[in-house]
Image (tube, helix red, strand yellow):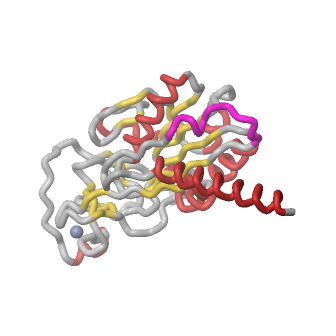
Amino acid sequence: MKKQVLFYAFFTFISCTTNMFCMEQLQQSKPGATCDIPVSLFRPTMQQSGIIFALSGPMFAGKTGTLIALAKKLKDAGIRFQAIKHTFDTERYGSGSSLCSHEKDQFPACCALNTSDLEAYYDKTAQVIIIDEAQFFDTPIVDWCRKLRAKGIHIVTAGLDKDCFKKPFGPMPELIALADPAHKIHLQSFCNICGAPADFTCRTIASQKTVFVGGAEAYVPRCAQHHTTPEEKTSQPVAITTTTTTPATEQPVSK
Ligand SMILES: [Zn+2]
């Protein structure tokens, strides 16, 4: 009996230590910086089920940069993976089908418009599927991720959890709910007015559309105090200064 108690105590200590180590590994150093996702999590193991990551946050928080850093490490480690992004994002920064951060760092990827595309074209031999701009996909993506996880495939999703109206954005909140507890990562940026951690994306051009794809010419990160929605701006305009002149690309709204 005493041996069993000692064994249980030892097992609990090891489990807690391991969890603390993993959480520490996933922590982000500061708002706007990329988060280091350890490649060791994706090495083949005896486990039957895959891992689901959800990387959320406003624009300019380092989500795509984190995915690109992970893709480079997976490539170096020889782990078979596929990077996919939503078709809506192909014209921003002239990135085409590549993952492209706001710092213009790029990594080759393929594009999909909806979950049917994902199912048809995903690499059936990949151990890890990376999906950027997940907020633009349709809701069946949630069940699709669940299905792949059951097959032992790891999924890393990244996207905006809130749109510029501060409303839940597409399937991202559900993907966060689906993600493994230790693998929900919420990144922040810096408010472009006061410098405080920013959890919101503020649109700086006149459009009431939910989906309006753009970069620094159309959006800025804001804290709760300084964020304004497009509706609020219509009644009380806010002076914004941006340096980029690339025009934003308006997309059809499906919702
Ligand atoms: Zn602020």
Q: Quadrant of residue 93?
A: top left
Quarter placement of the N terminus: bottom right
Q: Residue furthest bottom?
A: 235
- In the foreground, 184 or 253: 184
Decide if residue 86 is on the left or right side of residue 245: right
Write down the region rendered in magenta: 38-48
Was residue 80 drawn as part of the magenta stretch in this picture?
no
Q: Is residue 221 above or below residue 37?
A: below
Q: Quadrant of residue 69?
A: top left
Decide if residue 169 is on the left or right side of residue 90: right
Q: Residue furthest right?
A: 1
Q: Quadrant of residue 48?
A: top right
Q: Quadrant of ligand 1?
A: bottom left
Q: Residue furthest front?
A: 2
Q: Confirm whether residue 65 shows in the render.
A: yes
Residue drawn at x 31%, y 72% as measured from the top left = 224
- In the foreground, 6 or 195: 6
Q: Is residue 66 above or below residue 183?
A: above
Decide if residue 181 is on the left or right side of residue 92: right
Residue 112 in the image: state x and y as whole percent.
54, 38
